[in-house]
Image: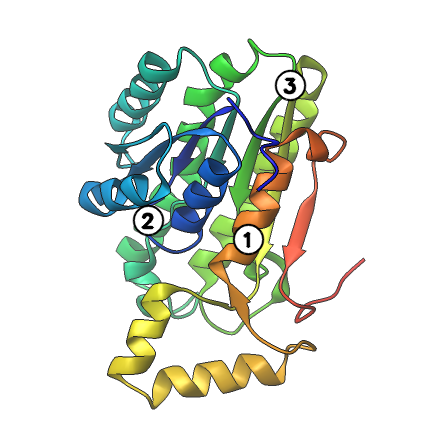
Amino acid sequence: MNGRLEGRRIIVFGSATGIGAATVRRLAAEGARVCAADINLTGAQSVAEEAGGDTFAVAVDISEEASVTSAVEAAIERFGGLDGAHINAADLRVIMHDSDALEIDLEVFDRTIAVNLRGHLLCTRAVIPHLVKNSASAIVYTSSGSAYGGEPTRPSYAMSKAGVNALMRHVAARWGREGVTANVIAPGFTVTGEMRLQMEANASEPQKWSEHFMSRTPHTRLGESEDHAAVAALLLSDDGRWINGAVLDVNGGSLMRS
């Protein structure tokens, strides 16, 4: 790695697995000092140990304001400030119950919004006062192509991700002149470590998902967590300073739009 993030102080919300874990590893490899925050503290600690450098883990439930505040305070105490944040957490345990607008259990809707949207607002509110103290800082959100793709199922998930895109544009417009850039990564179908385990445990349904998404992707492979981590590292570095208020589709071309 080229060390372009040398000394940057960054907190990653949702860092124990998948895209968040890959981002922690990538940022640390590029020289950043990283706080790996996740509700799964054991998983975050394992990622932090693997990443090495000045990387440490804290527990956070982004649906709880006090928990978010505590995690950010821990990062500030360790690093003395913040230069960036990757807000990546989502509660995927309820996504299989996210049916349609008529049938969905409102508890599923409320939980999805509480984590995937309200939680992102709480993280934003916690980090902005620290980021504006610097002349060049950045927030990266993880959204999804579901925000604008249109699907017959998963309305709660899609609505929450559309809200994240709107939140990002607000932050970019409101604090851009104070040196804070805000952007979204919108992943396509991504084969995370958890997905691989599912495929090994149950070769039928996951394999059908893989074949389905591969048939819609004009590329040689499906996405990996590291693909998104690379884009996050770009947006959190000086190489990404002129990108602000953008949704970057990282999907191998499965959804093309202008």
At label 3, counting other C-alpha atoms closer than 10 Å, the crowd grade (few under 14, some 14-19, many 20 or more) is: some
Local secondary structure at mark 1: helix
Choose mark 2 or mark 3, whichever is in front: 3
Q: Amino acid at mark 3?
A: Ala
Q: Position of residue 96 (x, y in %)?
A: 33, 69
Q: Is residue 143 visible?
A: no
Which residue matches tag 2?
Answer: 110
Q: Which is nearer the N-term, disc 1 or disc 3?
A: 3
Q: Position of residue 254 (x, y in %)?
A: 66, 71
Residue 188: x and y in percent read: 57, 64
* Dot 2 crowding, Cα within 10 Å, few <14, some 14–19, many 20+: few
For label 1, the residue is: 228
- Tell whether 103 sits left or right of 222: left
Amino acid carrying mark 2 in the image: Asp
Inter-mark Cα distance, 1 to 3: 22 Å
Going by the picture, which residue comes out furthest to the left? 42
Q: In which quadrant of the rendered image does the C terminus lie?
A: bottom right
Q: Which residue is mark 3?
A: 136
Residue 149 visible, this orientation: yes
The quadrant in which residue 191 appears is bottom left
